[in-house]
Amino acid sequence: MKSAALSREARAEALREMAGTSEGRPLDVLVIGGGVVGAGTALDAATRGLRVGVVEARDWASGTSSRTTKLIHGGLRYLEMFDFHLVAEALRDRALLLKHLAPHLVKPMPILYPLTRRGWERPYVTAGLTLYDNMGGLRTKTRGLPHHRQLSRAKALEAFPGLNPETLTGAVQFWEGSVDDARHTMTLVRTAASYGALAANRTKAVGLLRDGERVTGATVEDLETGRPLDVRARVVINAAGVWTEEVDALAGASGVEVRASKGVHILVPREKIEGDKGLITRAGKSVLFVIPRARHWQIGTTDTDWTLDKAHPVASAADVDYLIEQVNQWVRTPISREDIVSVYAGLRPLVAGKSADTAKLSRDHTVLHPRPGLVAVAGGKYTTYRVMAADAVDEAAKDLAGVPNHMPPAGAVPASATDRTPSAATVPASTTDRASLAGGVPASITDRTPLAGAEGYAALLNQVPLLAAELGVDEADVRRLLGRYGDLLPELHALIAEDPTLAEPLPGGAGHLRAEIVYAATHEGALHLDDVLTRRARISIDADDRGVEAAEPAARLVAPVLGWDEDTIRAEVDAYHARVAAELRAQEAPDDPTADQARRTAADLVPAP
């Protein structure tokens, strides 16, 4: 499979093709939402042979899917909630991602669960982890990860010297998967595009088209130009995460109720805590994760209701102080506010339940059919995105069986109430219907469809010295690059071959090469500076100044690709600096409303039409 490039030109062509559906054959499926579930849904539908479009109002993974704990995990704590189905589902997909689907993006990570009580605690935790291991597969080969092992107090301190010895009686070590969530989501979109999906970020659904009760597509606005266009589709899948209710409302439908739960993470330098393994334990009303990254420790998370600006959730001083208090109970050398390099906050889309406490709501997902032609998928957890996507497309297939793959063009006289297309349950598929493929929509195959960059990854790992010589970088850089691009690395190499200066580090870029910045615009769908520094390269949380120094040199690198003039470069850099300043002010605010008000002082950059 040749991987598609998410270039500016490819986006424009995708929008032209989607606009053309109003004059002819509609899409089979239009997906609204470019987070991990929407991206996964587009891939699932495309690999079933369906004609697919996917739109995202901002950037790929700009919401929840770039602001997670960045783990692929089964959800150990859900065993205590007796949510065995969710855990088994997540563990199965964890193994798939590690071994087959995305081994270049998902890496094994050893994690300690510290023990503090003698007697009952070790057998209790061991029983849970034994069940966890067995649910994930009885053999290491199928699990993709080793089984858990017991550590004495001395061995626990040897494995993680930075732990406070006064709180510890021992530990149990187990394994999970680590992921760069934003890159993984973007790679899902690229993979879907490689199988024919039409993908357009910065494209907002502003209305849903209807023929009577049936949804027949969406009116979307190209936010780069301000141009509206109608996209006809036989089924629309709403995968908008915390915005699910707003999209359903465009059709006058009342579907699933979603509650937004805020999760906050802080990053401190690696030298502040001695160790190279992760740490997971209970903390107040949430779970404490202390996860080693290349340059920092990532510490999270909180779990609190958020009812303010969904586009820009922010951490308050209360959130930051809570995390510092929790982690200092476990580390030998306390950390302080002065140690914090960066902070980020994200929203979990939880299916509303009876509990007033978001931490007690299930992470199971829901698929609903609020109107004919409209499917909504919500809830779940990052690790189970593939299952959610498959379930959503399965539900959409019920509609596809009864809807012809040709619709009247925009402006045609609508059908009367007596001759509108009946529901899929009452109408057999026509001989020209898309659903006539093998008598119906084929079953999902994403459990055996590697993502872009995966297939040749293992072979390239064996060629690290050769690649280092060809690229003109050291072997550590090659391993890092392979962990980001897999077998797409030759595309980056081609940029460097054309301009050898791109092998140099980006000033202030936390170790990223200049070529990675250009590649973000040429191949990975970045349209703005924030897309590059926050999601393609993660410089906004990895750099000590949150990417302020890197902003201008990065903008100048992508300017020729994106057609920016000097005024646009300045506007992009100023907007990025303003966002960083606003988030820093928010972190000093005492509570959510004050933090939200501080963040709103930096408006989103809106391109001139």
Image (tube, helix red, strand yellow):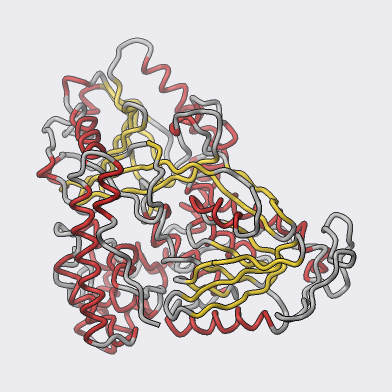
Q: Residue at x 49, y 62 (%)?
A: 34
The N terminus - image quarter: bottom right
- Visible residue check, residue 479: no
* Residue 355 locus on image (x, y percent): 51, 28
Q: Nearer the viewer, residue 542 or 278?
A: 542
* Residue 87 locus on image (x, y percent): 53, 36
Q: Image quadrant of residue 523?
A: bottom left
Q: Quick check: 416 above or below 170?
A: below
The C terminus - image quarter: bottom left
Q: Residue furthest top?
A: 119
Q: Quick check: 588 above or below 519?
A: above
Q: Nearer the viewer, residue 463 or 304?
A: 304
Q: Image quadrant of residue 115?
A: top left
Q: Nearer the viewer, residue 359 or 306?
A: 306
Q: Nearer the viewer, residue 117 or 238?
A: 238
Q: Image quadrant of residue 135?
A: top right
Q: Residue at x 28, y 43 (%)?
A: 291
- Visible residue check, residue 529: yes
* Residue 383 locus on image (x, y percent): 49, 47
Q: Quick check: 72 above or below 503?
A: above
* Residue 483 locus on image (x, y percent): 35, 62
